Amino acid sequence: ERPEPTEQERNQAEVLKQSFRKIAGEDMEIDAYELQDILNSVFTKDTDDCKFAFPGFGIDCARSMVAMHDGDLSGKLGYEEFKELWDDLRRWKGVFKEFDRDNSGNLSSYELRNALNHVGFHISNGTFKSLVMRYSDKSGQINFGDFIMCAVRLKTMLTSFRGHDPQNTGFAPYDIDSFIQTTLYS
């Protein structure tokens, strides 16, 4: 369930739409580099309601964002795919701010667990430990960019798994190529 956008978010969405059209060109699709430019133009300037500085998304994160919504495996996002991504990012940003209780600009592992549960990612303790090892810094803290990357990868992998498990059995048959493509492209 997504909250209604705030006035600031509606304004950002309009700026994003204009930026998308300008950058996308004739094919009306953007690649990871163009996505990175669009998102960083908004997220790095959006400090009014944040208590933390954000230097921007790296290219690896932008590639993972494209992969998450790239249904036709073109390596690009059309505007509708981009809007879905924008909705995810808006929601995850709100959750990050809500669960960063000490306004440090980072989530502790405890805060991360609660934030992931809040957005619907219910994972085992073993998987959670792997996420913390993969996305936390030396002191065990997860910054905003790493939280987004974690959420993107979780969503991509869970969507892929569910696509291979239509009966919702908890088991998904993958051939080696499908498994490699899913894990590499996320």
Image (spheres, rainbow, N blue to C red):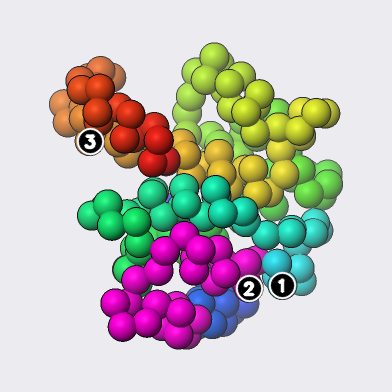
Q: Say what amino acid the circle numbered 3 marks.
A: Gly
Q: Within the image, what quadrant is residue 93 found in?
A: bottom right
x 34%, y 56%: residue: 75
Cβ atoms at labels 1 and 2 below 8 Å apart = yes
**Which residue is denoted by mark 3 in the rendering?**
163
User: Tag 2's secondary structure?
Assistant: helix
Quadrant, the C terminus: top left
Tag in front: 2 or 3 = 2
Cβ atoms at labels 1 and 3 below 8 Å apart = no
**Which residue is denoted by mark 2 in the rendering?**
41
User: Tag 3's secondary structure?
Assistant: helix
Horizontally, residue 146 falls left or right of residue 156, namely right
Calculate the distance from the C-alpha at mark 1 to the C-alpha at mark 2.
7 Å
Q: Can residue 24 be seen from the camera position used here?
A: yes
In the rendered view, tell whether residue 131 sits above or below residue 64. Answer: above
Residue in front for this viewpoint, 44 or 94: 44
Q: Say what amino acid the circle numbered 1 marks.
A: Lys
Residue in front for this viewpoint, 137 or 97: 137
Q: Give the range drawn in magenta.
A: 18-43
